[in-house]
Image (cartoon, rainbow, N blue to C red):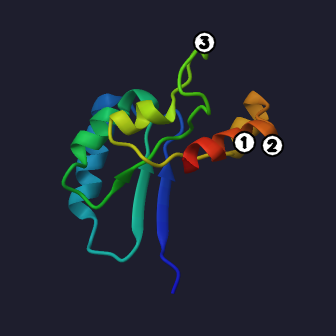
Amino acid sequence: MRAKIVAGNWKMNKNLAETETLLAELSAKLPDTNAEVMVAPTYVNLASAVRTLENSKIEVIAQNMHFAESGAFTGETSADMLLNIGVDTAIIGHSERRAYFAESDAILSKKEITALQ
């Protein structure tokens, strides 16, 4: 049987206090489940979300990641930076990234290669 995954992408919603409150409530109310539960809060709240859910079954994931390890990529976040704060999963190829930031199949391919390393 395939594993069930339930993921919530918060997009550009929730400030720090709202994030911490919602995650604490969600963690307390989440029953034992066989589903893998993931949340993708905003980047500025990722580290706090990881700390808040430290003893929870809920996994914190990133909404995006850049394919480069470092460099002149204003506003971007590398896979290593995400790993450094305890995030090892990212959404890649979201339709909004493709539409608003013109992410091509070539860029998506680079991100996939980076993510799988």
The amino acid beneath tag 1 is: Leu
Which residue is label 3 attached to? 72
Q: Nearer the viewer, residue 39 or 29?
A: 39
Mark 1 in CB contact with mark 3 (< 8 angstroms)? no
User: In the drawing, does residue 75 fall left or right of residue 102?
Assistant: left
The image quadrant that residue 84 belongs to is: top left
User: In the drawing, does residue 84 fall left or right of residue 93?
Assistant: left
Q: Secondary structure at mark 2?
A: helix
Q: x and y percent of residue 73 in the render?
A: 61, 17
Residue at x-position 27% and y-position 39%: 20
Q: x and y percent of residue 40 in the render?
A: 46, 45
Disc nearer the start of the sequence (1/3): 3
Q: Secondary structure at mark 3?
A: loop
Which residue is label 1 attached to? 108
Q: x and y percent of residue 9 in the render?
A: 51, 47
Q: Secondary structure at mark 1?
A: helix
Q: x and y percent of residue 46 in the render?
A: 37, 35
Which residue is label 2 attached to? 105
Task: Give the CA separation, mark 1 to mark 3.
Answer: 19 Å
